[in-house]
Amino acid sequence: GDSSVAGVGSHEEGVAAMEAFVMKQVDKALSNAKSALPEDTLASLKAFKDYTKALQEDVLKLHASDQKDIDLDLDDIKNCSDSGLEAKRSSMEDLRRQHHSCREQQAAMVDTMQKKCEDYNRTRKSDRFAGAPPTCSLAKVATDSPDALEAFEACLQLTYRWTAGLEPLREICNAAREEFHDKADQCKKLQSSFEASACLHATKQEGVCGCRERTISHFETRHKTVSEGEAIRQHIYKSAVQMGCFIDVLVNDATDKREALQTCKELPVDVSHLEIAFGLVPDASVTCSQAPPCSESWLSHEYGAKAWHNRAPAATCAACDMKVAGTPTPTPGPTPSPTGVAAVYSSNGAFLALNKETGEAH
């Protein structure tokens, strides 16, 4: 609901006149204790007494209203959560571990692949193979000529002996390459799954953080306004109690009212029940300062800083399409008071105001 602080109303002069009227009667009674009050004055004082009682009741109601608004605002902040956020975080962390483990395995395979292929390449380039490769022809494989067939078979045997020392090494190298590329493809798929999960988690988290930002800002605005209203209400409540005390003495039949009126002037009024319990802003269940997926700092943390990154670098990161779901709308905020105005409190058509520049109640 709206704050109890509002602009000055048309009844300000009437309220000020009431206070002036009561204090005028107090001054008269102090200067001439034995002077009797006219009937119309007594009637006015009794009406004003009813007003001060109603005013105190209204102050209590306004206090309760502001306390309720503060409590609702704190609840709004507390309700900035997403029941699925923890599940999204758990899924993201599991995929992070899988991707990390896969890249570690891929990085470890680099040395194995390089060693096996280096063995093949070194052997292939050695004098044994590069220095004297077979130069004979196997083109006569389908010949029926005995001489040509003999030449073909001699070449086949020579070629077989030559390749027998090289082909197994080539097969080992190729198998290691295929295994490495298969692992790289597996890691790339895991990376895509991890990044998609990180984006989903970030979207959910952004919703929670955005909600907290809005509701906390709203709470702080209301806190400021309600604090002002709290001080004003306490001042007005004290004034109402004191005015009621004066009126009780003035309408009493006692002849000498000076001592009782002096007691009213010095009357201590407890307003501790009008203090607002503002509480504390609930702690966030998430960290709202985390870098978004695919940002420079995120890439450095997730990939660049890892031991496997140089040997098994991550693929290009797929940036998120951040679409944050709607979050709760905060409880309507307080209506600001005009600069330097007095706050007005109503009671059965009458109003009491306090000028915030002078601190005077009217």
Image (cartoon, rainbow, N blue to C red):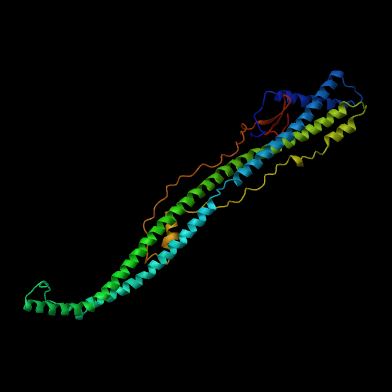
Q: Position of residue 126 (x, y in %)?
A: 22, 79
Task: Name the residue located 90 percent from the left edge and 27 percent from the top edge.
Answer: 252
Residue lying farthest to the front in this orientation: 144
Picture layout, residue 79 above or below residue 25: below
Q: Quadrant of the N terminus?
A: top right
Is 252 situated left or right of 327 in this image?
right
In the picture, residue 4 is in which quadrant?
top right
Picture layout, residue 324 above or below residue 149: above
Task: Name the residue located 28 percent from the left edge and 69 percent from the top edge.
Answer: 174
Front residue (pair 340, 272): 272
In the picture, residue 315 is in which quadrant?
bottom left
Front residue (pair 153, 306): 153
Q: Quadrant of the C terminus?
A: top right
Picture layout, residue 129 above or below residue 350: below
Is 289 situated left or right of 52 in this image?
left
Q: Position of residue 296 (x, y in %)?
A: 42, 55
Is 100 situated left or right of 34 in this image?
left
